[in-house]
Image (cartoon, grey):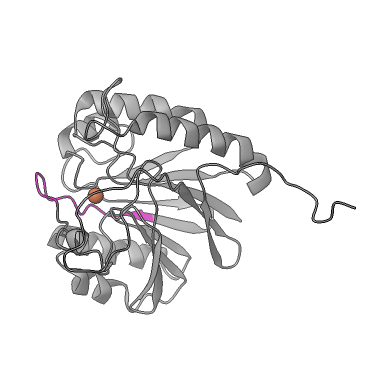
Amino acid sequence: MKTILQISDTHIVAPGGRVAGRLDTADALDRLVIRIGAIRHQVGGLDAVLVSGDLSDDGSARSYDHFKKLIAPLGVPLHVIPGNHDAHAPMRAAFADQIPGAGPINWDHRIGEVCLIGLDTLVEGQKHGTLTRETLAFLRAALNRADGLPVLLALHHPPFPCGIRFMDDIGLTNKQDFADAVRSYAGELRIVCGHIHAMMIQTIAGHVAISAPSPNSTFAYDRRPDAPVGFHTQEDGCLLHRWDGGFQSIRIGPDDGDGPFPFQTS
Ligand SMILES: [Fe+2]
């Protein structure tokens, strides 16, 4: 049994800053980390933390330092992939001990019987995402190495259209290449992503794909072509992925309210 926590789209900036002059993303992450610490004994422990892109809002070295300080109390191995707000060089410098020294930030790790694969979709300076030929080749090789074992496969940009126009406009440009690469994998494969600050579940080439919420903001599910462009201040937590002979994915909200209260009062 293995448990991997997925936190996405933390959008951290240098200490004291706010995103879009409004969101205190550091405070939101800090509170989520405290919440995870408080429920850790209930969920059976954590084996790894996956951060699925947009760790930083501005790609600055100071933002990555700040991120690392905020996430450190979790105290479990951290695995990070870039999102469109990240920048390769400062991210590589901040996580030099765990990501490749050159090329796309792709990696695969064994966590017990689970193969955790991370893919780089960042096109430096752009908002949309693309899996380069090199990254697609890495994916095929990593799936070969996984050889039928359970796979948790992470990329920042969802490999599916989400229906929110302004996010689909900056989505993954080569979804079909991704679908083709995962279609024939013989084992259990769960695809996880971020970017759209909302939890959605979709089937891709026969596999379940789930987008994670963001700890600090939400994009409304508004399919109208003229839907307003922007974020809501609703904080939406993170996901827990558990392998125990099958995958189970659980949303962990930003707070748990009061309780538990007994069902009957008399
Ligand atoms: Fe993003």
Q: Residue at x 54, y 45 (%)?
A: 47
- Where residue 186 sits in the image (x, y, percent)? 42, 77
- Most extreme residue toward the right, as rendered? 266
Q: Answer with left or right where residue 92 lies relative to residue 200.
A: left
Q: Is residue 186 in the magenta section?
A: no
Please tell me in which quadrant of the rendered image residue 146 appears.
bottom left
Q: How many marks?
A: 0
Q: Is residue 3 left or right of residue 234?
A: right
| Residue 247: image location, x then y, percent | 53, 65
Left or right of 1 in this view: 111: left
Which region of the structure is painted magenta?
117-127
Which image quadrant is residue 117 in?
bottom left
- Left or right? Give the position of 205 relative to 147: left
Q: Is residue 126 above or below residue 152?
A: above
Q: State whether residue 71 appears in this view.
A: no
Q: Nearer the viewer, residue 29 or 133?
A: 29
Residue at 50% across, 28% down: 73
Question: Which quarter of the rendering shows the N terminus?
Answer: bottom right
Q: Compared to 68, does 233 lie above or below?
A: below
Q: Position of residue 113 (x, y in %)?
A: 53, 58
Please say if 167 is above or below 27. below
Residue at the limit of the structure toward the left, as seen here = 125
Can residue 7 be seen here? The reply is: yes
Magenta part, dominant SS: loop
103 to 152, vertically: above or below: above
Give the percent coordinates (x, y) of residue 181: 26, 72
